[in-house]
Image (tube, helix red, strand yellow):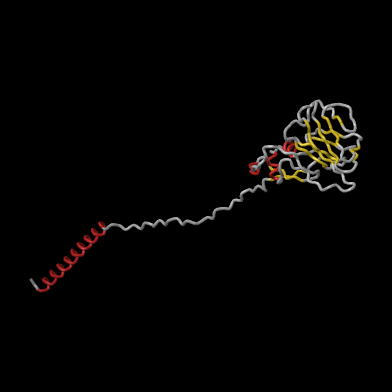
Amino acid sequence: MTIRRLAVFIVINIVVSISVTLLVLNLWDAGRTASRPVSTLVPTLLAPVMTSVPTPIVATPTAAAALSHTYVVQADDTPLSIARSLGVRVEDLLAANNLHEGDILSIGQALVVPSAASPAATVETTVSATPRPIATSTPAPLPGDTFITIKEIASAGNLLSEAVVLTNLSNKVDLSGWSLSDGEGHKFVFPDLVMLPNSEVTVHTTGGTNSAADLYWGQSVARWGGSGTIAYLRDPSGKLAASYRVP
């Protein structure tokens, strides 16, 4: 074998060895790549951000907000008759106006009327268990002043003997056009009659013949029998002169 052929043979072996080596390395690398776990990127879930929402402020209705309208007192009105006509409890009407049972109302007086369904209707008022006559505090009359009081209501509830007794503590008074009522629409109008100082006049519920001291209403039923009924005495202009509450 010549040197030239030997060199060719060596070169061929070297090339073949390199080729085989490269092939083996490629196969080995491919196997490692196939068996290597694939890393998967998983997005991290962020916790929801909690925002603080302020609690809304709710306005609570007050007792004053439940008062819906006003009522102007008319002639012969009483707390009881007003409450009945407006469909509210008399206790609520008294409480809404800072009044007490038996208080005297004046014509033209504005009363606050509570709503029938309002919380103000739950207001409790303390009412005396024993009704008392209304005491009118009036200074001593001056000359020319008129001061007539309701002294009593005798035999309340008994038609034959029921009567209202009036007393004149002032000077001479002409009772013509004056009226006596119970606040429920029943009214007695005085005829021409002059009351002398310190005199008394009795108004009988039943019928009879009028005199200077006794007047007769001519009613067929008693008008002052209900406990708590109030008698109102008014002058011809409708101004309240006196009142009396049946015990």
In the picture, measured across the screen, residue 74 lies left or right of residue 3, that is right
Where is 184 relative to 59, above or below? Answer: above
Answer left or right for 24 relative to 140: left
Where in the figure is residue 219, as x and y percent of width and height? 82, 27
Identify the residue at image location x=19%, y=62%. 24
Please state which of residues 141 and 182 is positioned toward the viewer in this rendering.
141
- Image quadrant occupied by the N terminus: bottom left
User: Relative to 235, is 117 on the left or the right?
Assistant: left
- Which percent across, then down, holds residue 162? 79, 29
Counting from the top left corner in percent of width and height, residue 97 is at: 71, 46
Q: Quadrant of residue 104?
A: top right
Outermost residue to the front: 198
Q: Nearer the viewer, residue 74 or 141?
A: 141
Of residues 183 and 199, the one drawn nearer to the viewer in this rendering: 199
Image quadrant for the C terminus?
top right
Identify which residue is drawn at 89% across, 27% down: 209
- List x then y, in percent, for residue 225: 75, 30
Say above or below: 155 vs 103: above
- Quarter where residue 150 is shown: top right
Tell me how many marks there are.
Answer: 0
Closest to the observer, 82 or 227:
227
In terms of image quadrants, where is residue 113?
A: top right
Q: List the single residue furthest toward the left.
A: 1
